[in-house]
Image (spheres, rainbow, N blue to C red):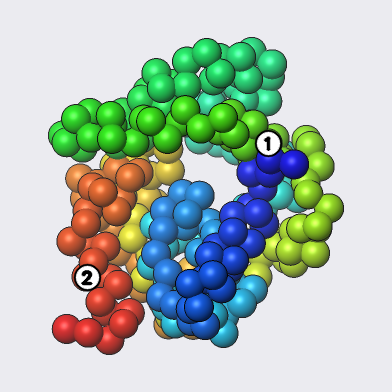
Amino acid sequence: MRSGQQAALARDLLELMDALHLPQATLAGYDWGGRAACIVAALWPQRVKGLMSADGYNIQDIPRAIEPRAPETELRLWYQYYFNTQRGVDGLTANRREFCELLWRLWSPTWKQGPGLYGLSAPSFDNPDFVAVVIHSYRHRFGYVPGDPGLESIERALEAQPPIRVPTIALCGADDGVGPATEPDPDVGLFSGPYQRRILPGIGHNLPQEAPQATLDALLELLGKP
């Protein structure tokens, strides 16, 4: 099956590390990539020296996903509910580049270089598996469709919201249009190892591209390099 569930992302990352003969690595990521990195750090900490995670703890809490959230949060997540309809499937299929460009702008509203850089990422949305994987992801995270049976053991482990014990620096965009940083830190209790959280003013959702120097600085700090 073409799975977009979070366990599939983590398995892909583990298999990539194995293929590259990397017994251990310092991981960095945001959104789906950040979710994969967080899961590997939580469930296979022996494989992770350090973690730079955009937006903190990025592991989905699927058993609680159907609980309503604050109206303003629900508004920002409109696209997720759209993808749980046939209209959403048809709309993403017909308008994938335009749809993703809209989210690109909404999620990084203060990123001046964003519109000019979108065209470099847009061709990836033409992948024939793109729509199927995206739709499965946004339906599985609410518990509305089953996942890959071969990944069920990972999903069960994630239901416990396992703590991340490896050294972590969380970078959060103050202007993130889908998940703006808030105080106090809602994720602090999910990190049991060395942990820092840094809120970056003027930065939106696409944190590694919008704040490359801050991302690099965090990685070098985790690696113990000046």
The location of residue 189, given as percent across then percent down, is 54, 71
Residue 223 in view here: yes
| Labels 2 and 1 touching (C-beta < 8 A) | no
The location of residue 221, given as percent across then percent down, is 26, 79
The location of residue 98, given as percent across then percent down, is 39, 18
Q: Which mark is residue 217?
A: 2
Regarding mark 2 in the picture, which secondary structure is present there? Answer: helix
Q: Residue at x 44, y 82 (%)?
A: 49
Q: Which residue is more in the foreground, 66 or 1?
A: 1
Q: Residue at x 47, y 28 (%)?
A: 126
Q: Which mark is residue 15?
A: none
* Quarter-of-image position of residue 91: top right
Q: Which residue is more in the foreground, 69 or 220?
A: 220
Residue 114 in view here: no
Q: Is residue 58 above or below residue 135?
A: below
Q: Quadrant of the N terminus?
A: top right
Whole-angstrom CA distance, mark 2 to mark 1, is 35 Å
* Relative to 93, 137 lies left or right: right
Q: Is residue 128 above or below residue 19?
A: above
* Quarter-of-image position of residue 137: top right
Which amino acid type is shown beneath numbered disc 2? Asp
Q: Which residue is mark 1?
A: 136
Q: Residue at x 29, y 58 (%)?
A: 199
Neighbourhood count class around disc 2 (C-alpha, 10 Å): few under 14, some 14–19, many 20 upward: few
Regarding mark 1 in the picture, which secondary structure is present there? Answer: helix
The location of residue 27, given as percent across then percent down, is 42, 69
Which amino acid type is shown beneath numbered disc 1? His
| Mark 2 or mark 1, earlier in chain | 1
Q: Residue at x 68, y 36 (%)?
A: 136
